[in-house]
Amino acid sequence: MKTKIKSGDLVYITAGKDKGKSGKVLKLLKARNKVIVEKVNVVKRHSKPTQQSPTGGIVEKELGIDLSNVMLLDPESNSPTRVGYKLNENGKKMRISKKSGEEI
């Protein structure tokens, strides 16, 4: 599935327990239609001691958020915006903000 959001984008959460927060996309899970956003949707998981982490304990990690619940942040006004596409002078397709018309 083609998505308008890429890894490294700044996004705004529009629904769920973290509604109103924003953060950077760490990972895109295309098969599940989800994104992992930095410091958003954080849960605690208990882990057993392993060779990598000999102590084990409680680990905080980010879980995925559905793509329909995030919007890209406009680079100019830092507000949520929809994404459009436009061809530049070289004929290459680029993403633009529908709010300001700026390239993302």
Image (cartoon, rainbow, N blue to C red):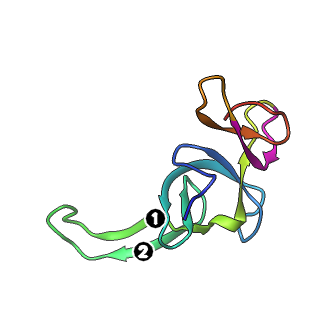
Type of amino acid under label 1: Glu
Residue under numbered circle 2: 45
As for residue 80 lying within the magenta part, the answer is yes
Disc 1 crowd, CA 10 A, few/some/many (<14, 14-19, 20+) = few
At x 33% / y 71%, what residue is drawn?
A: 57
Where residue 10 sits: x, y (%)? 64, 44
- Tell which of 60 and 90 is nearer to you: 90
Residue 18 in sight: no
Where residue 26 sits: x, y (%)? 49, 51
- Name the residue furthest front: 91
Quarter of image, res 104 = top right
As displayed, is residue 34 above or below residue 99? below
Quarter of image, res 3 = bottom right
Residue 19 in sight: yes
Where residue 92 sits: x, y (%)? 58, 33
**Lower sequence index among marks 2 and 1:** 2
As for residue 57 lying within the magenta part, the answer is no
Type of amino acid under label 2: Arg
Quarter the N terminus occupies:
bottom right
Q: Which mark is residue 83?
A: none
Quarter of image, res 78 = top right
Residue under numbered circle 1: 60
User: In the drawing, does residue 61 fall left or right of residue 14?
Assistant: left
Residue range corresponding to the magenta coloring: 77-86
- Tell which of 38 and 81 is nearer to you: 81
As displayed, is residue 55 above or below residue 10? below
- Tell which of 80 and 53 is nearer to you: 80
| Marks 2 & 1, CB-CB < 8 Å contact | yes
At x 51% / y 68%, what residue is drawn?
A: 63
Q: Helix, strand or loop at disc 2?
A: strand
User: In the drawing, does residue 15 fall left or right of residue 58?
Assistant: right
Task: Calculate the distance from the C-alpha at mark 2 to the C-alpha at mark 1.
Answer: 6 Å
